[in-house]
Structures are given as C-alpha cells and as structure tokens.
Image (cartoon, rainbow, N blue to C red):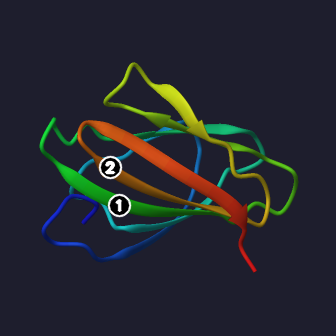
Amino acid sequence: AIGAPHYGGFTATTATGNITLSANDSVVQAIDPGGSGRDVTLPDLGSNGQGKVVIDNTADAAEVLTIKDGANGSAIIGTPTQNESAICTFSEGTWVCVVGAAN
C-alpha cells in the first residue's frame, strides 16, 4: 500500500484515462499512458500521514504522466516521460517527487 505503515505491492496497468490513486494502492505503479498523456493524482494522506510511491512510465512513445498532489489542490509535482520514473514521498501534508531515467 502507498500509506504507512504497510508499504508494498506492484501494479502494472495501461491507462485508458486519468488515474487517481488511493492509500491502499500498490507502492510500485508501472503505468503505460496508453497513447496519450495522463494525469496521476496521489492521495491525501492527512496532515500527519506518511506515504511513498514509485511511478514508472512504461510508454512506448513520448507520453507524459503528470503527477499531481491530491492533498494540495492537485498541484503538479512531477512529469515523468517515456522511460522515466518518479519516486514520491508524503510527509506533513505534502507530496514531493524526484523524477529521473528508469535505467
């Protein structure tokens, strides 16, 4: 799950629309945007919540995943494109992501 204290799981999916994750979703998300850019909104885990998620963009073309902070007005916090991943952590009411090549 994305939310503490139980981290774990792996999900691979081909998106057919935008995605909204919940605290119970897998901590590792391999997402193929399915031919178009997609939004991925991370859950609000509360002011004292903690969480983490790894999002791997498995696109076969230059399709961007726009990661949004569901706890803060859906602010954009990361934009991994083809063959990039984002490592995101949630603490004190805010998500923060680091994006880089998924080699």
Q: Residue furthest bottom?
A: 103
- Horizontal side of residue 78 vs 93, given as left or right: right
Q: Residue at 87%, 56% (x, y): give it.
A: 61
Tally of marks:
2
Residue 21: x %, y % from top left: 36, 47
Q: Which residue is more in the foreground, 62 or 34?
A: 62
Q: Residues within 10 Å of mark 1 (few under 14, many from 20)?
A: many
Percent across and percent down for residue 69 are: 42, 34
Neighbor class of circle 2 (other Cα within 10 Å; few <14, some 14-19, many 20+) is many
Residue type (three-letter) at the residue carrying disc 1 = Lys
Give the structural element (helix, strand or loop) at label 2.
strand
Q: Position of residue 50 (x, y in %)?
A: 21, 54
Q: Judge from the rendering whether residue 13 lies leftward or rightward of residue 81; answer left or right.
A: left
Mark 2 vs mark 1, CA separation in Å: 6 Å
Relative height, residue 76 to residue 38 (above, below): above
Tag 1 secondary structure:
strand
Name the residue: 34% across, 37% down.
Answer: 94
Q: Is there CB contact under 8 Å for labels 2 and 1?
A: yes
Left or right of 29, for residue 86:
right
Judge by depth and name the residue closer to the eye, 17 or 44. 44
Picture coordinates of residue 60, whole percent (x, y): 83, 63
Residue furthest toward the top? 73
**Mark earlier in primary sequence (2, 1):** 1
Q: Residue furthest front?
A: 92
| Residue visible at 35% across and 61% down in the picture | 52
Q: Residue furthest right?
A: 61
Residue 84 shows which numbered tag? none
Residue topped by disc 1: 52
Say which amino acid is labelled 2. Phe
Identity of the residue drawn at 39% across and 19% down: 73
Q: Give the residue pinned by disc 2.
A: 90
Q: Quadrant of the C terminus?
A: bottom right
